[in-house]
Image (cartoon, helix red, strand yellow):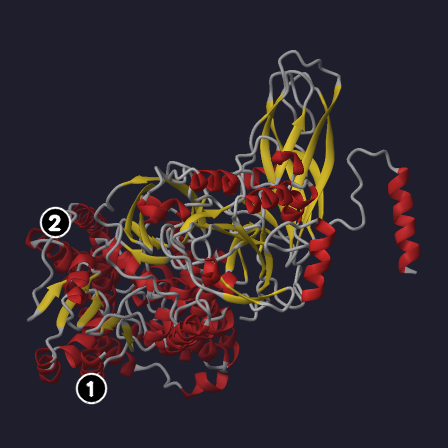
Amino acid sequence: MTVRRTLLAAAFAASLAAPAFAEPELGQPAPPFTAKDDNGKTVSLSQFAGKTVVLEWTNSGCPYVGKHYNSGTMQALQKKERANGVVWLTVSSSAPDMQGYFTPKAARAWAAKEHWAGSDILLDGAGKIGREYGAKNTPHMFVIDKAGKIAYMGGIDDQPYEDPDSLKGAKPYVAMALADLKAGRPVATPVSRPYGCSVKYNSAE
Amino acid sequence: MVRYLAGLAFALLMALPAVAQVPGAARHVQAELVADRTAIAPGETIHVALRQRIEPHWHTYWRNSGDSGEATRLKWDLPAGWQAGDFTWPAPKKLPVGPLMNYGYEGEVLLPMAMTAPASAKAGDKVALKAKASFLVCADICVPEEDELAIILPVGSGPSPADPKWGPAIAKVLAEAPKPGLLTAVFQPKSASAVALAITGAPLKGADVAGAYFFPFDATVIDHAKPQTIDRGPEGLTLTLPPGYAFQGGKSPAAMAGVLEAGGKAYEIAAAPGAAPAGAGGLGPPVEHVAAGGDRLGLAVAAGFAFLGGLILNLMPCVFPILAMKAASLAGHGGGDSAAEARAQGLAFGLGAVATFLGLAGLLIGLKAAGAAVGWGFQLQSPPVVAVLCLLMLAVALDMSGVFEVGASLQGAGSGLAAHGGKLGAFFTGLLAVVVAAPCTAPFMGSAIGWALTQSAVAALVVFLALGIGFAAPFVLVAFAPGLLARLPRPGAWMDIFRKALAFPMYGAAAWLAWVFAQQADAEGLAKLFAAAILVALGGWLLGLRQRRATRTGAFATVAEIVVFMLVVVSVTSIAWPQDKAAAAEVAAETYSPERLAALRAEGRPVFVNYTAAWCVSCQVNDKVAISTGAVRDAFARHKVAYLKADWTKRDGAIAAELAHYGRAGVPLYLVYGRNGGEGVILPSILTPDIVVKAVEAADKS
């Protein structure tokens, strides 16, 4: 009994001590954040007020990220949406020593190699933004509308497979959500299952 | 050297005909296709399985991979007319990764599926069934792997024989795989952060549901990484689940299907939206096995306690008279040549006791396997058994009073008490002693037996064996130690008086069993028991009469004995099963029910629950010396304690389940629930008024 009590108390204490893994809510204001980018510049969500913002979680070593970059579909979407005035933030929440951890230099090298076409790469090695948004996978996608509210969250499409063949005929949820927002329509599919590798958070936390 | 051996192995592999792909060195999963039959007949359906051998610390995924990852897939490339079914997925493991949760497999796993040959398949052909398997295999990083696999099956003409290796292995996976249709489930969103999933059905009744977990088929219905909380009910359980994406924006999915793992078994469930039925909750979370009776109690410790418990049983009022007489009779064998006879009798007694304990254990294990809610002392829940035991006690008492002599007629008159029974008699003395000892659940035995009954059959038998050895030890020791034997007083005239004096505890035991019987039966049943008791006494007297007068009245006495014996049998069998009768009303005690307990706890009152039974000696003693005292009554009044009595005199599944949740297989169990909720506190099995008062004071504060 005593042992059990102690264990329960310890578990409770541990649950309080662990950083909260937040659950962002659809239609609610997007959690604010500030981070350094790959050039050492400080970037805050608030500076993009009035603009549509895309958050893309990435991990350079993840085969699911590879599916979308090797085929060029991710870069094509980035290019197209930036031309529409969308801010595209690529976030790396891999912890130091974990797969896909970005030092500023590594992030720049990856961007050059992949012909990455987003607005900025945010270095979140501490996993702070990732946990704030409950980012589970790479790629896990969020779209924030011009009012600063979460308009879409989930997978980049409806094909949760690593196989590049699955790109053919996939429903591109993120592109569809951005098209809906541009046209002033309600987003038809505002939530989907995110898929991919797990975000490589520092597991000690 | 290693390199050389590896090279050799590689060369050997290359030399073999390539049936399936030889896995590359850098692979994390080694895959192959195996079949449960050695051949397949035209039109026949067999099972083929994808066998994965996964590198240590790596895993592949279940049909719902959880927060990340991807389910294993197999794409067949079959000859025309051949058909393959979907995977049968074994229940997955929870694989937490940082703040995320995945569902998958580690080590070796078989994913079976049906394979049907077309009726047009030609017997004698060999068919290559080819498939491409895709795995995502992950440790802290993930690697996609692919394998081109093939299995070559001969087409037979008749039903095909089972494959000696894969036949049983695949059958086991199929047998253990979660099955639909056994449980009923409904779900209902409760708040933004809680969905109630209520699951009911016969397999969950009385099951130990500690650690129960719901694995959804659809990755969007729950938040996999968040804890699921369990509320037990008499008919099942309710899981409070963290809602997933499908519940975002006030929406709700049309169904929640998946696998429930509970009590070591997995069930497939399909929940429709709806309110939870009564009985799906209300009993609070399951207890994760308390220290005294839980898994932490190792086999050695349990066996040790069982041995001690067995020793203590020797002192119980219903056992001691029998053993004392037996030991005294052994003293007659103290000298020289009859020492061997004493040892033989000691061994026979030990054998009888141990065999009876093992027999009871086997019966208990069998009944439990058959799903009966039983525990130690279960046999006393059956009124006919209580009646027979009562008459048996009476017969033993009459024997001790000298009304008649058991065994004397077999051994030849005049050999006296020392020859009383011989080796066979000793064996049956051992058996009898165990049977009458069962109700005297010593405190040590409670947790050992409770533990044993939650373990494997082998562990349970070990515990019962230790109990039997402990029980038999003092007697066997006396029989084997001539020194001890010599210290026992020599048989003589005093023994006759001693024996007649010891008859009275036996009469007491008979009276006590009659009282137990009265709790279970009605007045008419009790009258029949008394009639049977008088007939037993009459039969005993007639037997004694014949033993004393040798054969002179033989014919008459034999007929009379047979008539009396038959009357006893008739009256015992006519003792009707009892109707439900309200438990004897104790002052201020309410009858326990899980619902009543939940209601009282909801009112914020401290609750004292007394799990008891009329046939439980320690329960009655505790009742008299601790609970039914002025101090406790005042304390109950002062702290507004609700007093619930859970009477296990008769079989009751809900109470047995409750006992099991606290790691007990029998009564007594005393629980005190605090005013502000939380776990029930278990009080010791031997109570004093002080223990109860202090527990109640604490409960009022917590």
Q: Which residue is mark 2?
A: B579
Q: Residues within 10 Å of mark 2 (few under 14, many from 20)?
A: few
Say which of B641 and B509 sits in front: B641
Residue B699 in sight: yes
Name the mark on residue B690. 1
Residue at position x 56%, y 38% from top? A159
Q: Secondary structure at mark 1?
A: helix
On the image, the x and y values in percent for residue B465 come to: 47, 65
Q: Is residue B177 above or below residue B597?
A: above
Q: Residues within 10 Å of mark 1 (few under 14, many from 20)?
A: few
Q: Is residue B205 above or below residue B111?
A: below
Name the mark on residue B236. none
Q: Chain of mark 2?
A: B
Look at label 1 and name its amino acid: Asp
User: In what quadrant of the picture does the N terminus of chain B appear?
Assistant: bottom right
Look at label 2 and name its amino acid: Gln
Residue B426 in sight: no
On the image, the x and y values in percent for residue B454 come to: 42, 60
Which sits earlier in the primary sequence, circle 1 or circle 2? 2
Residue at position x 52%, y 77% from top? B337
Q: Chain of mark 1?
A: B
